[in-house]
Image: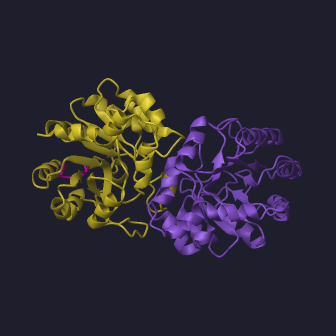
Chain colours: A yellow, B purple
Amino acid sequence: MIIDACAFVGRHPFVRSHNHTVPDLLRLMDKFGIDQAAVSPLAGAFYQNAQEANEDIYANIHTNSHRLMLVAAINPAYPGWDRDLRRSREALHAVGIRLFPGYHGYKLGAPEVSALAETAGKMQLPVFISLRLWDERQHPPMCMVPAVPWKSAAELAASHPDTKFVLSMGRFGEVAEALKQTAETRNLFADIAGIQGPTDCMRKLVAEVGSDRLLFGTELLLQYALPARYKIDYGNLSDDDRQRIHASNLMAILADRQ
Amino acid sequence: MIIDCHIHLQGARIEPELVESAATLGVDRLCASSLGRTWSYEPTPEVFIEANNDVAKCMRKYPDLILGFAYLNPVYLEESLAEMRRCIEDLGMVGIKLWVAAYADNRRVFPLVEKAIEYDIPILQHAWHKATGNLPHESKPTHVAALAERYPEANIIMAHIAGDWERGIEAISPYRNVYVDTSGSIIEAGMVERAVDVLGARRVLFGSDAHGVDLPVAVAKILGAEIPDYSRDMIMGGNMQALLDRRVG
């Protein structure tokens, strides 16, 4: 069983993309042996009102609910975020929420983020934090978005020990440091979508922080899927580590939901 | 035959994990250069000679695996010309590596390119168009295009598809003597397909940028791209082999 903790559907705003729909995602999941995916709308990073992006993709996600789970884009700096959160949970069956602090223009230390983290914790919804969507060096001139500092995500997690957080698209060093910094609360997890090196990266990362807070992630449909598979398959990991990263860690997070 | 056209030493050596990874993944050859034991943007002759000696040691340690590329600094032109001769003729290296000491179309680069043309060896030229700002003298794809226009006989490999791959591909597409390598940490969907569509598979080379990038990631970028199998075979090694077969002597 392999579950992708970091998938998106929607058109790339700056690059012509051939794959952007739910059927495209399902086809690539089939091709690369991915059983299920936690999916967010890419437009959720770009719409002023992120909830509209959740509504756009809900029907297609729900039709394929045996394979796809909605991770709703929520903007805590936008009016009515708490209403959006409840509607996403209750009507759209979201299994988690995704924040794009860089794209929505707030800091993770802001009071509204703390309020959201508190609410999400009570609803037992994990909070996925996109540190970045693309490598900063690749950004188009009209949309330069700095990466979210990993430290602020670790501090947020440490200050809300009853809420689970997932760091998304972190680099090797960012993930290693953030997980070390939350070694006591152990409520911060990280997907592997943004880790492309160094040599033998997965074995080195597991040696540093263990495998119980790492999640398989591709960042489909923005990135190729196979690198994430190969990172694990050729990562010099034990079978137990592989299983934890491939699926069981995320399943455990999602099983907390009421 | 699978050839990774772009790796670097880690300090003075190749990590055994990389050698094992290459064997597991069926990568037959690694084209290796060193950027210095600690990376040096503007290496002195002492630094690049030491770096090349480290590569030569790795070639001797793994004679069936490692193909050496000589690291040079055009700012030290006389020393670089002498070092190129030593590396190619005495140490058996198969190409040269130019990083960020001078723009690709700087006039100090020209004599090195002319010598590379004589040997008929590839020039691995770093390039990146960074939205966050390039290093001083760090080539963008337009610099590579300018060099290619001046020297149509030179075989130039533009590393990383210049990072910003759409821009990079467009900039060098008219110059059939410029190849692109797929090395680096960017695994954005569509980059390999776009390179094949615009440049043709013949001009696309598999590269990893190990040790900075994990070899399985780099291999999967090509294997996972939606391109014909014959294009994939060319990219994974056929094209680089053809370039290496051109060498004089």
Q: Position of residue B130 (x, y in %)?
A: 56, 56
Q: Which quadrant is the N terminus of chain B positioned in?
A: bottom right
Depth check, front residue: B19 or A88: B19
Question: Please, which residue is most extreme toward the top here?
Answer: A184
Work out whether residue A88 can be spotted.
yes
Q: Residue at x 41, y 40 (%)?
A: A149
Question: Please, which residue is most extreme toward the bottom here?
Answer: B174
Depth check, front residue: A147 or A67: A67
> Which corner quadrant of the image does residue A199 belong to?
top right
> Which corner quadrant of the image does residue A207 belong to?
top left
Q: Residue at x 32, y 32 (%)?
A: A212
Q: Which quadrant is the C terminus of chain B positioned in?
A: bottom right
Relative height, residue B14 to residue A46 (above, below): above
> Which corner quadrant of the image does residue B242 belong to?
bottom right
Numbered label tally: 0
* Side (left or right) of A159 relative to B10: left
Q: Position of residue B153 (x, y in %)?
A: 78, 71
Give the magenta range: A74-81
Work out whether residue A46 can be spotted.
no
A78 magenta-colored: yes
B67 magenta-colored: no
Magenta-colored segment: predominant secondary structure: loop
Q: Where is residue A179 in the image (x, y as percent from the top left)?
A: 38, 31
Q: Which residue is drawn at 36% across and 67% down?
A: A19
Q: Residue at x 17, y 37 (%)?
A: A256
Q: Where is residue B88 in the image (x, y as percent from the top left)?
A: 83, 52
